[in-house]
Image (cartoon, rainbow, N blue to C red):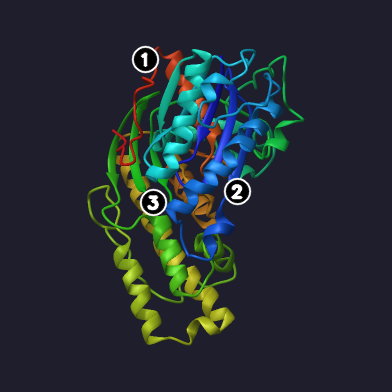
Amino acid sequence: MTILALETSCDETSAAVVRDGWVLSSAVSSQIKLHAEYGGVVPELAAREHLRNLIPVVQTALREAKIGRADLPVSQGAQQHVPADLELDAVAATQGPGLPMALLVGFKAAQSIAFALRKPFVGINHHEAHLYSPWIRSIASSHEPGSAGVPPARMELAGETPALPATSPAARLRGGNVGGIFFADFTAFQPNVSLIVSGGHTMLVKVDSELKHRVLGSTVDDAAGECFDKTGKLMGLPYPAGPEIDRLSEQGNPKAHDFPRPLLNDPGDDFSFSGLKTSVRYFLRDHPALPDNAQHLRDLCASVQAAIVEVLVKKTIRAAKRNHVRCVTASGGVTCNRALRRELAHACECEGFVLRLAEKSLCTDNAAMIGILAERKLLANIAPTSLDEEIKPGWVLA
């Protein structure tokens, strides 16, 4: 089964081709530089960039996967021009949640392609794709010590790596911006508690079996990634501030300042980070010159990061123990944070949990995880999405 997947939920335009669990290609065009001067994503600008970038990104994905002609126009009227020899069995796209205008670009383009080819179309929940992304693994990381920032003893790896398809894109895949050779490995799947943590959402999900899950808790105000970016902005750091805080924290003292850990001792699984953001704001009001000192700034970053990470790790481990699972997974953009990966690995090792972290290149928005989930749904005989369906900007993960 070969699927073309599109992802345009926020500020990254991505297209991927998936076949029988293998990611044949994955191209991503980021808009970070465009939005940096505004200190955040501007929805209208994001939509315009998606319109500008979608055709070349799709062409790149098709060319890298070598599944047919890559001159696929996905503009208005695409159903009249899609090449008939395009080797696709289905088309998928992010349906929500996300920025409405951004979602529209990829979703409607994918529907047009599916209509023109008379192929099934699958609308995917972006968060659900993140939820199952830890089961997409890299051949390289499976055999290299310390992959994904976690010692191999703490990561569960499946047995034999399946043979590459006859049309293996092993050498070409790197050109598609994935950074390795990836395939979906659900052979070792087991019940787990999953942490999805990104700029807009932070949630804990109990996954009982493949495609069967329920949300345990989510953010009641600011998400963890939002807290990283907003506190970083208060410190004068460039957007997005999360990666910069991660970098500066490596040489900072996480115990320099004692910031609050919101809802850390609350018995529930919800998250709240607005109080931490407010605390940092008042701290900087009282110490306005502190960010001017390089070491003091590093200490401040490390202290803020330590507060966020402690909440994420402790609540995740607590939920896993309460739900009697032996596996923990984590995904989403904030999962790229090195301190979070280290602390989560250490906590899981102490508790005897198996830990599966999404590959860093698959933590941020990408179409590869959209395509993999669409394939799993079709294999499970879940009905395709109607071509009359609309986007769901506020789609809540069930």
Q: Position of residue 7 (x, y in %)?
A: 50, 36
Provide the residue designation for mark 3: 200
On the question of residue 156 being in view, the answer is no
- In the image, 201 versus 31, the foreground residue is 31
Q: Position of residue 163 (x, y in %)?
A: 68, 17
* Front: mark 2 or 1: 1
Mark 2 residue type:
Gly
SS at circle 2 = helix
Proximity of marks 3 and 1: CB atoms separated by less than 8 Å? no
Provide the residue designation for mark 2: 149
Mark 1 residue type:
Ala
**Quick check: 255 left or right of 34?**
left
Separation of marks 2 and 1 at Cα, in angstroms: 38 Å
Q: Residues within 10 Å of mark 2 (few under 14, many from 20)?
A: some
Separation of marks 2 and 3 at Cα, in angstroms: 24 Å
Q: Earlier in the sequence, mark 2 or mark 1?
A: 2
SS at circle 1 = loop
Mark 3 residue type:
Gly
* Front: mark 2 or 3: 3
- In the image, 152 versus 96, the foreground residue is 96
